Amino acid sequence: MGSQIKKISVHFPESILTNEYLEKEFGRWEADKITNKIGIKIRHQVQKDETASDIALIAAEKVLENENRNEVDALIYCTQSPDYFLPATACILQEKLKLNNNCAAFDFNQGCSGYIYGLAIAKSFISSGIAKKVLLITAETYTKYINNKDLANKTIFGDAATATIIEVNNIERIHEFILGTDGSGCNNLIVKNGAAKNKYDEKATEYQTDSGDIYTDNNLYMNGPEIFNFTIEAVPKAVNECLAKNSLTLEDVDYFVFHQANKFMIDYLRKKIKIPIEKFYSNMLYTGNTVSSTIPIALSDILHNKILQKDSKVLLCGFGVGYSWGATIINI
Amino acid sequence: MTKNDFIKDLLECCDLTISNPTGETLLQEIEGYDSLAIMTMIAYIDENFGVKLTGKDFSELTTIDSLIEKIGKDLITID
């Protein structure tokens, strides 16, 4: 018994942050430099009273249009911005989406590798007979974690939610996975305060990076150079392992969709892995890095704009916070 | 690659500017030297010399000469 991606919907909050605003506010990087180097013109931001589950709900409602909701037998929610410590936000979404009481619902905490993990879980549920139709939701609001005086992270991250329906299929269209972890990098992309280890601290000390960005332990901290080093080491290896596990060569793959971290990083990875530019997706201009949502946003773009022919083989690779990574091959 | 070529190429590839750069130029004094520039420099050095420098390496570097030392003097001719 196989599985396939049936539909993907995306949702972006209305409020946007432009490069022109960042140039005016910080005076460090020109708007054009951000566009050319980072590959982002605008990023979306939720309102203060809006949470990841609010935008997740909108994305899920869109994908469930014309679907029989009673058929959804698992709701998997990927976020690092849960509404509460408990219950799982997926349970709240199950009720709001009016899904069946026989529907499994749970959260999992992953960032940029999250969509690959979600597909792996969905495929496992389907192949084991636990579920026939899975709703995989990704939603992230990193902008809430970022210090107002942190230009580097404000430039990169945007908020978004996506919803994907994965269903049982006679032919397998979601192929073999590789998943990996290196927890030694956990401190290089982290929000230290607010959970069980360290309480949120109103009087947290402000730190300044070498570049002049300000953050406290209540905020998202990212060591950009270390994350870059991790990716140039881990991603080429993950791609090769994924190809080997699927008995494919680089040439056999029609298209590559990587986590859209930033343009400079993924362009460098493409060159390092020797992927032809015409086979490589790179587009975060109007979204920014939306963490676990970048890959489904890319897939939605590919599907809606008919960028690929039916049955094309696409390699997906997610990587980041954790460190955590994953890759798989799908037929689109 | 000679040292002068290296300095010229590095600054150009990484969008960095400073007048009359030499080996003694302090990295912190170069216009545009920030986390984005460091990421670009890590890529440049990985691509051209096959040497992986970390963020920690960069925090310990002072001058362009100290960067050359870190990459390995045998890879860049000191003229």
Image (cartoon, rainbow, N blue to C red):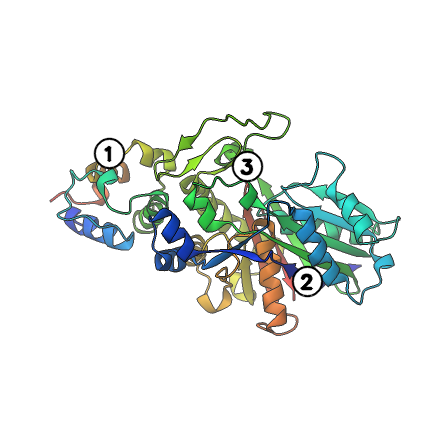
Residue, x 82% and y 48% (percent of image)? A95
Residues marked 2 and 3 touching at CB (< 8 Å): no
Q: Is residue A244 visible?
A: no
Name the image quarter holding residue A272: bottom left
Instruction: Please give the residue where the numbered disc 3 appears in the rendered image.
Output: A182
**Circle 3: residue type:** Asp
Q: Distance from label 1 to label 3 (Cα)? A: 30 Å
Badge 2, how many Cα within 10 Å: few under 14, some, many 20+? many
Q: Earlier in the sequence, mark 2 or mark 3?
A: 2
Instruction: Please give the residue where the numbered disc 2 appears in the rendered image.
Output: A8
Q: Is residue A68 left or right of residue A287?
A: right
In this view, A99 is above or below A187: below
User: Pointer 1 indicates a residue of which chain?
Assistant: B
Q: Is residue A258 left or right of residue A122?
A: left
Instruction: Please give the residue where the numbered disc 1 appears in the rendered image.
Output: B62
Q: Distance from label 2 to label 3 (Cα)? A: 30 Å
> Which element carries disc 3, helix, strand or loop?
loop
**Circle 2: residue type:** Ile
Which circle marks residue A279 in the picture?
none
Residue, x 28% and y 54% (percent of image)? B13
> Which element carries disc 1, helix, strand or loop?
loop
Q: Position of residue A282 (x, y in %)?
A: 49, 62
Position of the C terminus of chain A by quadrant: bottom right
Badge 3, how many Cα within 10 Å: few under 14, some, many 20+? few
Residue, x 70% and y 57% (percent of image)? A58
User: Pointer 3 indicates a residue of which chain?
Assistant: A
User: Pointer 2 indicates a residue of which chain?
Assistant: A
